[in-house]
Image (cartoon, helix red, strand yellow):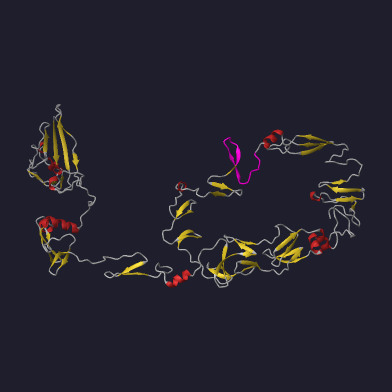
Amino acid sequence: MSIEVVFCIPSLVRWTCPQQQVLFLLILVMELPDLSSFNGNVTDLYDLFNNSKTFTGLTCSAPHTGFTPASASEPRILMVSFDAGDGSGVQNLPALKINPVPSALQAYKLNGYGTGDLLRIDSAVDKTLNANSDLSQTQYDEFWRLVKNPGSAYLSSSTSLAGDVTGAFATNTVVKIQGQAVSATAPTNGQILVFNGTAWTPATPAASGVASVVANAPLSVTGTSTATISISQAGTATDGYLSSTDWNIFNNKQTSALANGKILVGNASGQAEAVTMSGDATIDTAGALTLATSGVTAGTYSKVGVDAKGRVLSGSNLASSDITAALGFTPVNKAGDVMLGSLSLVSVTSDPAGLVAGDEGKMWYRSDLNTIMYWDGAAAIPLGVAGAGMQSMNGLVATAQSFVVGTAGTNITISSVGSTHTLDIPTASAANRGALSAADWSLFNNKMGTSLNSAQIWVGNSGNAATAVTMSGDATLDNAGALAIGAGKITAPMLSTGGINAATSGVIIAGPAGNLVNFACSTSGHVLKWSVTGWSCAYPDPSLPTLANGKIWVGNSGNAATEVTMSGDVSIDTAGVSSLSTTGVTAGTYSKVTVDAKGRVSAGAAIAASDVTSALTYTPVNKAGDTMVGALRGWQ
């Protein structure tokens, strides 16, 4: 079988030459493929696809003996004919137009140039430092300058240098520095180049003493060849030396040492002196002021005795003589006094209307019935005459009534039917209020009681029973519930886990998250100092200066300690003895007292009759013979 491939330029299909003379007729024999059958000046197969190729020597009739493409984009036509050898003759496949591809991803030739004619960069070259990009005009000009002038555009191994450096590029020698000759003498260890007026020559440097001077703050150094070391005077914002004036000021300040429980009070010499507060008050290390006891036992009294300072010195309850002396008579004793005068119930002919449950117990006399009535909270009930028998009980009026005990219901109740009153007491349970069963009694009796020795706690023992023990080991517990951790019980292993740091220096404090953390100061002389925002490191506050006789330190509105003389309700002397100011009341025993807003007795007097009647809101009956006015009634 043979295949005929015809490659035509479209303008030639209009030629009048015979079929077998079509441009570029190629008969490919499978055993011997070559280009010998190409017509025209075809050098190789790629000429057929070269858009800029000009063809000559074509075998078609004149004038079609040559061809020049109209443009680089003019297409080609590929026609394939074949003879299958079955007697059908030559058969043609449809013509296929092949469009040129100006920018192919991979081409055999570029604008007629083969791979051997082009300069390229291998794909294995690392392009990280110099990524591919377009050349600028300056770069393009420099590229062509290097290409066209290699002898002068860059150095080569044969280039000769001049000036301070001489010789070929690869073997040059420095013979001058800034135009001055360099000696050819080789230097020895430690020598330096020195200019002698003619050339640079090696020389050993002379000893120069201290090369440099540095100093740490607060020292400072000025100057170069002559160094001056200085230190400034210390101030509120500057570290430095302490002047003699400041030294005397600081030396004369009061030290922060103060014995337990003492306070600083100015003495007769105008100096702050440590004394223990005594007299009418004392003060502890927490600043809590405690008044001295007056000798009276704490309690509530109807009458008290006070001293000139308003303090209660004695107290007792009112005696009957105090009341009778204040009243001027003896009031009726409800336990059985005989009272002179008339006593009677109000007499009415009908039961009063509008009585409510709160009026229970009120009584009146029904003159129309000749009967005393009383209000039981719900109804008017007549009082029975002695010997007349039962009139009514819980609504039942039978003269013979009985009581029985039942267990019905969920609460203790009394039901009355006919002549029988039934008291129902159900067995107590979670839903019933009633009698305690024997089984429940045994159960409750075996429960743990509330008795527990002071400071002990209940802990389950190995038998699963609550046992009273005293907390011990690393911590103890008092009877107020306060837990105390023993000294040395918190050890380093305990402080190294759970967000807690072990202290290697400084102090252990509670951090923002509630854990113990190591807090240390990095500046010498700083101490741990507390403020409202937390702990910080700072220099200690200056000690207190002198304090005038009898004065004390009090913080003013500017948060500064100010010396003042204690006044007002309490004064203090140079020995720390505090004295309450007098209230103006004479020391004595009074049945009634007047106190001010500070709880001090400011006045005292005996109880008058008007005090008792004002408290009662009425005048009590004098059993010596008062006559009562009006009838005795239960609701008026």
| Residue 133, x across and y down, in percent | 22, 53
Residue 464 within the segment the image draws in magenta: yes
| Residue 216, x across and y down, in percent | 35, 64
Say which quadrant the N terminus sits in. top left
Q: Is residue 480 left or right of residue 352?
A: left
Q: Nearer the viewer, residue 298 or 323?
A: 298
Residue 17, quarter of the rendered image: top left
| Residue 88, x across and y down, in percent | 15, 28
Say if 418 sits above or below 497 in the image. above
Q: Nearer the viewer, residue 385 or 472?
A: 472
Overall secondary structure of the magenta stretch? Answer: loop
Identity of the residue drawn at 58% across and 47% down: 477
Residue 235 within the segment the image draws in magenta: no
Q: Give the magenta part as a residue range.
A: 448-468
Residue 581, quarter of the rendered image: bottom right
Residue 45 visible? The answer is yes
Identity of the residue drawn at 44% across and 52% down: 503
Say which quadrant the C terminus sits in. bottom right
Q: Nearer the viewer, residue 178 or 327?
A: 327
Say if 484 sits above or below 33 in the image. below
Q: Is residue 402 left or right of residue 92?
A: right
| Residue 115, x across and y down, in percent | 14, 45
Say if 431 sits above or below 525 in the image. above
